[in-house]
């Protein structure tokens, strides 16, 4: 029972450390689309096979990852610093005005 508690603690600690680690550099472009919703009055912004750092639209509200790899979302236009990972098939709310993403 103690061994199981220790293993669960180690897995939880590794998960937290993994979330805080910087995103690894990717050398290939993601295949698929990243779709960004801004408002009901604007068309969707679609990024086909995105690669590198992309600045989000000024009124961006929701990012949907329809690629085959994870997408990192940042709170600044330079894809630097802390980020949120959005796995394929998932989405997230994004910061408007100055956010960016990389795939």
Image (cartoon, grey):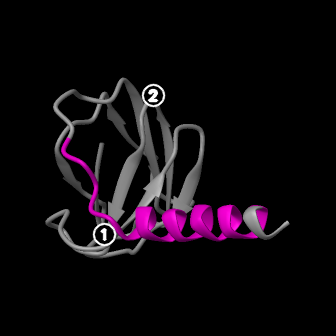
Instruction: Give the class, few, some or many, for how many residues have Cα within 10 Å of label 2's Cα (few <14, many ≥20).
Output: some
Is 65 on the left-hand or right-hand side of 53? right
Which comes sooner in the sequence, label 1 or label 2?
A: 1
In space, the residues marked 1 and 2 are separated at their CA atoms by 26 Å
Frontmost residue, 57 versus 43 = 57
**In the displayed structure, would residue 32 be above or below residue 3?**
above
Judged by depth in the image, the label closer to the viewer, 1 or 2, is: 2
**Residue at (58%, 66%) from the top-left corner?**
10
Q: Is residue 95 visible?
A: yes
Frontmost residue, 92 versus 43 = 92
**In the displayed structure, would residue 70 be above or below residue 1?**
above
Residue 62, percent from left and from top: 52, 60
Q: Which residue is mark 2?
A: 68
- The quadrant of the picture occupied by the C terminus is top left
Residue occupying the far right of the picture: 1
**Residue at (21%, 27%) from the top-left corner?**
28
Frontmost residue, 15 versus 64 = 15
Query: Main structural element of the magenta stretch: helix, strand or loop?
Result: helix
**In the displayed structure, would residue 82 be above or below residue 23?**
below
Residue 87, percent from left and from top: 52, 45
Image quadrant assignment for residue 21: bottom left
- The quadrant of the picture occupied by the N terminus is bottom right
**Residue at (53%, 63%) from the top-left corner?**
15
- Say how many tags the image has: 2
**Residue at (22%, 73%) from the top-left corner?**
81
Q: Which residue is mark 1?
A: 58
Q: Is residue 39 visible?
A: no
At mark 1, the secondary structure is loop
Span shown in magenta: 4-25
> Does residue 58 belong to the magenta stretch?
no
């Amino acid at each position: 029972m103690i061994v199981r508690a220790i293993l669960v603690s180690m897995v939880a600690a590794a998960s937290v450390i993994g979330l805080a680690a910087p995103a690894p550099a990717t050398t290939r472009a993601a295949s698929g689309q990243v779709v960004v919703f801004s408002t009901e009055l604007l068309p969707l912004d679609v990024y086909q096979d995105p690669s590198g750092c992309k600045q989000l639209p000024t009124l961006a509200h929701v990012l949907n990852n329809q690629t085959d790899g994870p997408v990192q979302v940042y709170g600044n236009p330079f894809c630097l610093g802390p980020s949120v990972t959005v796995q394929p098939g998932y989405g997230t709310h994004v910061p408007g005005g100055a956010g960016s993403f990389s795939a």
